[in-house]
Image (tube, rainbow, N blue to C red):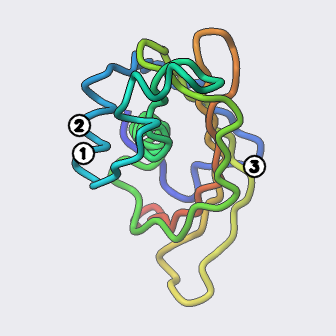
Amino acid sequence: MPGLYFEEFSVGQTFKHAIRRTVTEADNVLFTAMTHNPAPLHLDEEYMKGTEFGARLVNSYFTLGLMVGISVHETTFGTTVANLGMDEVRFPKPVFHGDTLHVETEVLELRESKSRPNNGIVVLLHRAINQKGEVVAQCKRTALMLKKPK
């Protein structure tokens, strides 16, 4: 199913995305290295054994990207003009290697674009949930969307 046009969204509409993803050590180490983040909480297992977490944490920016990426196919694939912003990004629980995440998306707001008559603005709330049912990440994503061609 391709992404939705602006007119196909409705406030309160909820998507329970079918794709799930188990986060691996390779995901975390590669992403952390590629983004030049030397933080020991992502890379140093021995260091993390002495912390309250006891093991390395998955890079939160990887979790954010994965959460939004999983949502794309059913919401904005091929119909997004641009992402305008991500607000209220939260990581209420840590993600560890081996956690399996699924994503839910809710449409919060819809409004016409004042400057672009062929576009509308959609505000989506994305939530990533682990195998224990805990919300591990969430954010409000504002996207400039295509309207249906006339």
Identify the residue shown where x is 34% and y is 52%.
37
Return the x and y of residue 38 as percentages of the image width and height: 34, 49
The residue beneath circle 2 is 30
Q: Earlier in the sequence, mark 1 or mark 3?
A: 3
Residue 73 % position (x, y): 39, 37
The residue singled out by tag 3 in the image is 11
Tell whether label 2 touches label 1 (CB within 8 Å): yes
Amino acid residing under circle 2: Leu
* Mark in front: 1 vs 3: 1
**CA separation in Å, label 1 and label 2:** 5 Å
Residue of label 1: 33
Q: Residue at x 75, y 49 (%)?
A: 11
Mark 3–mark 2 distance (CA, rounded to whole Å): 37 Å
> Neighbour class for label 3 at 10 Å: few (<14), some, many (≥20)?
few
The local secondary structure at tag 3 comes to: loop
- For label 1, the SS is helix
Q: Residues within 10 Å of mark 2 (few under 14, many from 20)?
A: few
Q: Nearer the viewer, residue 29 or 4?
A: 29
**Is there any visible trace of residue 74 in the rendered image?**
no
Q: Position of residue 71 (x, y in %)?
A: 48, 37
Query: Which numbered circle lies on residue 74?
Result: none
Q: Amino acid at mark 1?
A: Ala
Q: Quadrant of residue 42?
A: top left
Residue 121 percent coordinates (x, y): 60, 68
Res 48 seen here: yes
Which residue in the rendered view is the most extreme toward the bottom?
A: 115
